[in-house]
Image (cartoon, rainbow, N blue to C red):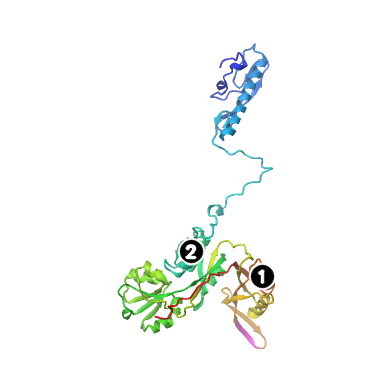
Amino acid sequence: MRSLNSPAAVDLKSLIRTAAPPGTSRVGSGHRSIQCNVNSSTNQATGISFGSGRARYEWQSACAILASKVESQQQDTQKNGADVVNGHATLGLVPVKDQSTSPLKKPLSIADFSPAPLHGAQLRVAYQGVPGAYSEAAAGKAYPNCEAIPCDQFEVAFQAVELWLADRAVLPVENSLGGSIHRNYDLLLRHRLHIVGEVQLPVHHCLLALPGVRKEYLTRVISHPQALSQCEHTLTKLGLNVVREAVDDTAGAAEYIATNNLRDTAAIASARAAELYGMQILADGIQDDSGNVTRFVMLAREPIIPRTDRPFKTSIVFAHEKGTSVLFKVLSAFAFRNISLTKIESRPHRHRPIRLVDDANVGTAKHFEYMFYIDFEASMADVRAQNALAEVQEFTSFLRVLGSYPMDMTPWSPSSSAGED
């Protein structure tokens, strides 16, 4: 290290040493901050030695030049957007802010890794059945351009949403001909998913068989129990002397026939199922009633925010330890506030199916314990609905809101070919 003859002759590159000398301290990894130590016998400026006879002003000038160089580097850093410490480029570390003035960042949760997608934007929607099922069509109507995920059972669709394998589930709850699908009402109570919407799908049944098969050759018709009941009279009118067997779903029946090459068996399914599995349509629109509609509900892990700017529907379930006598009071809470009910469904209480009533005069009687499901036309954002549920809660031992969601107002027209074949 050479001595400085004048402040202007300072070689600033010599200020950076490969080893950390006395008077320097480490900053970060591989970088040092520069300290100036003054000694009565020796003047040092970060490893720069001065002659014993050098004046103090020379040492002060060297420090001034060094400070000027550091300031210049900081200005270049601000212009270029690069982080530099003591002339060395850093790895772009984020500076630590004063925690007293800026709030701490929220820790990552599982929601950060699987954010809620936009409505219909590549949602993963679970449904029961195989491709070609009516539930798949309902999922496509509820969430256009979604990724439909088939499930072999209704409960698997619930679990797929709970385990983050799917974002939504679209499941049927009632049909205009076959009535309620009790299995899904029980699952709504067992699981903690929320109803976030509904969709009504007109059902158009077809009689499907393998190519070349005629009606006279059929000995068996298979389909979902609901589909078989919805086409019972039409099958009789077609003169088919066949055995009717129930399977898990309509499209699954078509897939089963195609896979096993069953030429004596037909399936009741959709026209899309015929296209997917290479089946021919022997009869089109074989449902007994042209107004055959199935109502599906859309389920999610989180509820939606209720609104009042469009028609909403709310679904609840409740029970009471004293039996069905409380039902009249519950209905009065809605009637008094002019809230229309669209559905009332009762299901036996799974944990307490039987209630014993002891009377000294007439003896012991056994009654069923029921859970009541009610749908009413009002949003939870509506004060009327809030007051009605507050009153219902006084009469019941258990009350749960399954969801408050927009009503499906999509117009539809029944099939004109139903029952004509």
Magenta stretch?
Answer: 362-366
In the picture, the quarter occupied by the N terminus is top right
* Relative horizontal placement of residue 177, taking residue 395 as reference (left or right): left
Residue under circle 1?
385
| Image vertical order of residue 327 relative to residue 111, above or below | below
Residue found 61% across the figure and 14% down from its top: 6
Residue 89: image x %, image y %? 54, 32
Task: Tell how many labels.
Answer: 2
Residue 126 bears which disc, if any? 2
Determine whether the residue tagged by mark 2 lies in a helix, strand or loop. Answer: strand
Q: Residue 205: give x, y in percent of width and height.
A: 42, 75
The residue furthest top is: 53
| Residue 176, magenta (yes or no) | no
Q: Considering the numbered disc 1 on the image, is that residue within a helix, a strand or a loop? A: helix
Position of residue 33 relative to residue 173, above or below, is: above
Is residue 158 something that shows in the picture?
no
